[in-house]
Amino acid sequence: MIKRNKRIIKYIFFCFIIIIILIIFPIFSYHKEMNINPLQSFYKKGAYHMHSIFSDGKGTIYDITKAASQLKLDFVILTDHGEPNIKASKSTSWFSDVLLIGGSEFSLNSGHLAAIGYKIPEYIFPPEPQQSINEVINDNGVCFISHPFDDKIPWTDWDIKDFTGIEILNSYSSARKTSILNLLSFPLQYIFNSNYALLNTIQYPEENIKKFDSLCSTGKYYGIYALDCHAKLPISKKIQFNFPSYKSMFKIFNIYVKIDKEIEKDPYKSASTIVSSLKKGAFFSVIEAIAPANGFETYFITSSRERIEMGSSTNSIHGKIIIKLPFNFETNIIVKRDGKIYKKIQNNLKHRLEIPVKKPGVYRAEIFVINNKFNKIPWIFTNPFFIGYRKRFQEKIETNLKKSLVDREGFFKVENNKLSTGDLTYNRNPEGELITTFKFNLQKEREKKDFWSVISNRNRFDLSIFKGFLFETRSNKKMRFWIEFRTKTKSSEVWYRHSFISDKEWKKIQIPFKKFYVIFGNKTAPELNNISSIFFSINNANAFSGTQGTVYLKNIGLY
């Protein structure tokens, strides 16, 4: 019996050794391809989607930029969680030779949105995705949908428009989808070869790419590789590993941004130059752990010899795509038109390719390194050329009230927490329109987290024949407010909310009932024939304690 047990133990030990060898051998045999080309002066190489101690990351901004400097990166884009994250947003600065660009990753109703280049507002960004997108884009910033098909936090609202693009690859999200064997072997692999370990958790992002191509059929959108780096690996609430490090992650994905002017000493002007290129789609994404892409370039030449840069559009439908590949290793190139394979070039060693184009469409390329272990994932992912591009039809905005709600003084009453204040007055302008004027001052109470000031009407309404609210607003400064309503039956009460921005000039606001979301009660479509109250409010969910101001409302009604 003892001999038998010894044999079993030896057998288990032998199997364990074999498994260890199978895990470790590929690690030592893996190497990235050599590329001795210098980076062109009109490209800047950086890393996108970082988290620091300003949210749930492990390191400081000094740790991050030190790691980036060691790898000679030109910039790093910080996207700490917050709406916005004030500290991260204000962190844009030069740290030695690395430009840190501060931004945030917003947690919205439909998922996460990473943004940079926006002005830091005096209020909290809205939870409605289109509202937040509009805010960032109107500030000439950029915003990318984070990990759109993540297992834990996917993006759910695809009715939005005018955002910059989506993450084609997200290393953190991809790692969660990898096999159990890869996860179990990851720590050991990481010790010996971090490049191999991290790449081994990445798969071809088929779902992301399919959605990206679908988006490009409706407008100009761009794809980006995202590190989503935290410099830690949480196992539970109390246990975490302090890897993968920032430096090891910077070796995995990089973005190459083409600039149209020299980088300046002023960090905000320099950041604006990078953001401007991202906004135009003048960049491509690279798996740096497969090979550096120094020397790569692509552009479109029209039949009239006009040069169109990546991310741009042209009305011309005749020309050729130029792809420069000054590398000494073989590549496979797939050029896609409207998401379908247009041209496939295998075992390529040519340093320059010309792809003729004779039809309109959205053209882009995926490039793979053949003799690399990870030859199934795109080494280079370019942004599209929009050939024969036509602008989309603009959505019509409703202009006519079907029913006025506030046609008399005294429609609303003021409500607020104990320390906040509110004052409500009514008057008519020279045109005879009733102006509702609401002055407020928000103050937080020590024992309570919530604070608010609202104008309310707690009467019953049947709004079932209407599509939504329509009103006009202005305020003494740019602020964000809520319009809310509640439904009430014998069995339950449900609260619905949507935000809007008010500024110094009058503007018309249209909000369909279907765009309101539930903040209390069962998440169901509203019973519009059972509305029990209507509110215009400002509170701790859209403003900070100490906020004060005046908002004016007129022509409040329904369409």
Image (cartoon, helix red, strand yellow):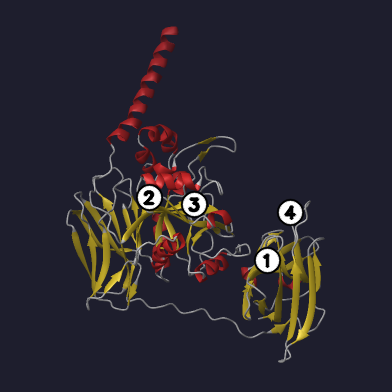
- Indicate the secondary structure of the residue bearing disc 4: loop
Residue at the limit of the structure toward the top, as seen here: 2
Nearer to me, 155 or 4: 155
Amino acid at circle 2: Phe
In this rendering, the count of numbered labels is 4
Q: Residue 330: x percent and y percent?
A: 20, 50
- Of labels 3 and 1, earlier in sequence is 3
Contact between marks 2 and 3 (CB within 8 A): the answer is: no
User: Could you tell me how far apart the alpha carbons at marks 4 and 1 are, in whole angstroms?
Assistant: 19 Å
Dot in front, 4 or 3: 4
Dot in front, 2 or 1: 2
- Indicate the secondary structure of the residue bearing disc 1: strand
Label 2, residues with CA under 10 Å away: few <14, some 14-19, many ≥20: many
The residue sitting at 78% across, 55% down in the picture is 445
Reading the image, the residue beneath label 1 is: 497
- Of labels 4 and 3, earlier in sequence is 3
Q: Is residue 185 visible?
A: yes
The residue sitting at 35% across, 67% down in the picture is 311
